[in-house]
Image (cartoon, rainbow, N blue to C red):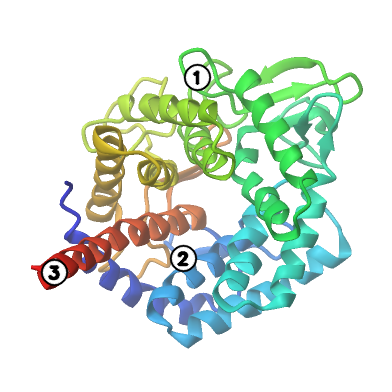
């Protein structure tokens, strides 16, 4: 059994940190920190990052019941209606946006207006499904390469599929799930390589559905292994198995997780790409580590014995190392953890705090800490029975 006793102290530090930063950030939408370690903000409410700050607050509120966190999160959600209702520039990342906000609030409070928002977002995501190629198109515009955006799909999409699975369960309508499963099959066929590294972008012909080519995206090259893309696959495939119980999805999730673990450096915090020369100056990406850790914790919870222990141990090592080496606990940085890499090929956001890195750190820490509670409950029950 792992030693995750450190998580209680880490959680206390986190809560105090967010109580402080929430007074500065308020109901704005942070993206990444600048050279002064202060968060920059997006005013475009359709951008994929908007759900992470309110989602982070809901995760901490669930444990602390600190009302100001809920108030800020709700205000953010109300502002996001502008994008949801105007239907302008919304793309496949609506899962990131409304799964972490409206659906989380619905789960916590039963609010039917939050449920309505989640179902609207799910309907939008399902509408992006290309029936000829069995894929979800990523964006409406593409500023990264020469691909036709109508036929461009990216590995990040796996993290948006839980929105469709939730909508199917919530409404009893299997169509949402059909789309999620069909897209997952396409990801396994065209994104997951034979060695279980991962393509970031795959371009399809939007009219015939045929694969055109692989694009490098935010990785070093078309054959490299962008660590955050790998983390999207670890977490996304684990969730795909959780919702479908399809054994092949579990096997793929485990194999990609094994690849991720194998490529980790000694301190368990990944570099931004696994297939580049590494030295002391090679940037890390803590956001990749934290997203992958969350996926490994999902995996561990669905496995038994040594397999469960393997992924739990790896997730614990990644999260603890990130807490100890990259946590912003004694400074004035707005971010919770630094060491994130946004887009290395473009030279943007190197060694910064990323709001999604912060979010997945909170999620991983919360999952690890809950294991302490479960252990204590089991020990208490055993003691009472004795």
Q: Residue at x 77, y 70 (%)?
A: 81
Q: Residue furthest front?
A: 385
Extreme residue in the bottom direction: 67
**x then y, percent, for residue 171:** 75, 59
**Residue 4, placed above or below residue 205:** below
| Image spot of residue 103 (x, y percent) | 63, 65
Q: On residue 360, which mark appears?
A: none
Classify the position of the C terminus by image quarter: bottom left
- Comparing marks 3 and 1, which lies closer to the viewer? 3
- In the image, 303 versus 334, the foreground residue is 303
SS state under label 3: helix
361 on left or right of 152: left
- Residue corresponding to mark 2: 38
Query: Which percent across, then down, holds residue 219?
Result: 54, 27
Cα gap from disc 3 to disc 1, whole angstroms: 55 Å
Rate crowding at label 3 as few (under 14), some (14 to 19) or many (20 or more) other CA atoms within 10 Å.
few
Residue 224's mark?
Answer: 1
Residue tagged 3: 385
Most extreme residue toward the left is 386
Mark 1 packing: few (<14 Cα in 10 Å), some, or many (20+)? some
Report helix, strand or loop for mark 2.
loop
Judge from the rendering whether residue 70 lies leftward or rightward of residue 304; answer left or right: right
| 344 relative position to 161: left or right | left
Residue projecting furthest to the top: 194
- On the image, which quarter does residue 308 sit in? top left
Contact check, label 2 and label 3, Cβ < 8 Å:
no
Q: Earlier in the sequence, mark 1 or mark 2?
A: 2
Q: Earlier in the sequence, mark 2 or mark 3?
A: 2
- Residue drawn at the location 19% of the way across and 66% of the way down: 376
Asked if one can make out residue 138 in the rendered structure from this viewpoint, the answer is no
- Give the percent coordinates (x, y) of residue 231: 47, 37
């Amino acid at each position: 059994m792992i030693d995750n006793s450190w998580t209680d102290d880490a959680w206390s530090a986190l809560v105090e940190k967010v109580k402080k930063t929430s007074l500065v950030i308020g109901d704005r939408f942070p993206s990444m920190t600048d050279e002064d370690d202060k968060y920059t903000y997006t005013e475009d409410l359709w951008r994929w990052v908007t759900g992470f700050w309110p989602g982070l607050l809901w995760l901490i509120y669930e444990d602390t019941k600190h009302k100001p966190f809920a108030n800020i999160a709700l205000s953010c959600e109300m502002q996001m209606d502008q994008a949801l209702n105007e239907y302008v520039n919304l793309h496949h990342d609506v899962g990131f946006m409304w799964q972490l906000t409206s659906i989380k609030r619905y789960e916590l409070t039963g609010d039917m207006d939050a449920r309505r928002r989640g179902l609207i977002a799910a309907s939008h995501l399902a509408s992006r499904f290309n029936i000829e190629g069995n894929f979800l198109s990523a964006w409406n515009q593409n500023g990264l390469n020469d691909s036709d955006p109508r036929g461009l799909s990216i590995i990040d999409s796996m993290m948006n599929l839980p929105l469709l699975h939730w909508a199917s369960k919530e409404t009893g309508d299997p169509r949402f799930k059909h789309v999620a499963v069909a897209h997952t099959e396409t990801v396994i066929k065209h994104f997951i390589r034979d060695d279980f590294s991962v393509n970031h972008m795959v371009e399809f012909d939007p009219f015939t559905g045929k694969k055109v080519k692989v694009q490098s995206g935010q990785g070093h090259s078309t054959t490299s292994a962008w660590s955050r893309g790998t983390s999207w696959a670890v977490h996304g495939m684990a969730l795909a198995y959780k919702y479908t119980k399809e054994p092949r999805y579990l096997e793929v999730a485990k194999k990609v997780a094994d690849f991720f673990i194998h490529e980790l450096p000694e301190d368990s915090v990944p570099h931004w790409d696994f297939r580049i020369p590494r030295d002391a100056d090679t940037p890390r990406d803590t956001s990749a580590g934290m997203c992958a850790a969350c996926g490994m914790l999902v995996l561990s919870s669905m496995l038994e014995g040594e397999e469960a222990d393997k992924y739990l141990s790896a997730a614990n090592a990644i999260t603890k190392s990130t807490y100890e080496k990259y946590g912003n606990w004694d400074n004035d940085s707005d971010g919770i953890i630094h060491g994130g890499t946004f887009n290395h090929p473009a030279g943007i956001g190197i060694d910064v705090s990323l709001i999604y890195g912060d979010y997945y750190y909170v999620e991983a820490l919360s999952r690890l800490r809950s294991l302490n509670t479960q252990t204590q409950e089991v020990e208490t029950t055993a003691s009472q029975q004795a």
